[in-house]
Each structure stands twice: as C-alpha cells, then as structure tokens.
Amino acid sequence: MTKQIFETYFKEHYSLVYRVAFTQMKGHADAEDVLQEVFVRLLKYRPHFENSEHEKAWFIRTTINICKDLMKSKWHSTTVSIEKIPEGEKSYFHLPHVNEDETLWEILALPEKYKNCLYFFYYEGYSIKEISQILKIPENTVKTNLRRGREILKETLSKK
C-alpha cells in the first residue's frame, strides 16, 4: 500500500472511525487508540475492497471489533465510564466530528444493542439493511432494537 493510498483512506474514513469509536468507548483517549489500531490493521492486512460500501463497512466492523476487544481488557474494566461523570461536567466532553445534542448523550447511555442501532440509523444515516450488514445481525433484530431503543429513549427523555 502506497503512502498516497493510505492517506486517501485516512482522509476519507478518519471522522467515521472516530465517531464510531467514541460512541463505543465514550472517551477521547480510547477513541483515538481505537482509531490508531484500525489504521494499523489497514496497513498490516491490506484488505481488498470490492466497492466503497465494502470499504466503509470494513472500517466500521473493524472499529467495533477493536472496541469490543478493548472493553474486555483488564484496564478498561477498572476505569471510570462516562456514565459516572456528573451531568454538569459532560459539557467538557465535546465530540469532534459529531453534531451533539441532548439526545446523543442519552443514546450513548443505552445498552450496546440499542445504542449501536440508534446511532447508526440517526447519526450516520444508515438504512436498516445496512445496519444489519455492518453489525452482522438480522434486519428484524435491527428493527426491534430501534423500536425498543426509541421506547427507552422516550421514557428517559420524558423524565427530564
């Protein structure tokens, strides 16, 4: 892989990988670590992409897998998560490359299966079929997770 090709991949997918990593890890440092590891794997494995959708899906799937691996680590299980940060201090955690709103923070606090579906649907603009392919789950599961996630979100937001 030439330097120019790598730079093109980096420019095209940096923001996407960072956003996905941040939604999974809920911290800048962890998201940056994941971002770095994704691009290291790109250099190491040099995958062949059939088209731009396959390319984008590879970056998302690789990011999610690295996040899951990191969350299983001993270090991650002994640190404080963003959910434990007082509400008034969350404004410090600005999300680069993401249009923030109050709802985003509530989505990030949801269980992973709802959070991923809602985030990809509303913030990344993916269709149910695309989310199904990215997360490797059936389309009906995506629909169910979207519906249940919306219900939980509606209940949570109505209490505020």
Image (tube, grey):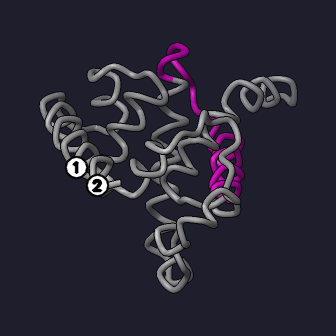
Q: Residues within 10 Å of mark 2 (few under 14, many from 20)?
A: few
Residue at (53, 39) in percent of width and height: 101
Q: Which residues, given as a range, are shown in magenta?
A: 31-54
Q: Which mark is residue 155?
A: 1
Q: Residues within 10 Å of mark 1 (few under 14, many from 20)?
A: few
In the shown orientation, is residue 101 left or right of residue 5? left
The local secondary structure at tag 2 comes to loop
Which amino acid is tagged 1? Glu
Q: Is residue 45 magenta?
A: yes
> For the residues carrying marks 2 and 1, which lies nearer the camera in this image?
2
On the image, the x and y values in percent for residue 20 come to 53, 43
Question: Is 119 located above or below residue 28 in the figure?
Answer: above
- Name the residue nearer the viewer: 110 or 103: 103
Q: Is residue 41 magenta?
A: yes
The local secondary structure at tag 1 comes to helix
On the image, the x and y values in percent for residue 58 come to 50, 33
- Name the residue nearer the viewer: 140 or 123: 123
- Name the residue nearer the viewer: 55 or 68: 68
Question: Is 30 located above or below residue 113 in the figure?
Answer: below
- Residue 143 occupies which quadrant of the picture? top left
User: Are dots 2 and 1 in contact, CB under 8 Å?
Assistant: yes
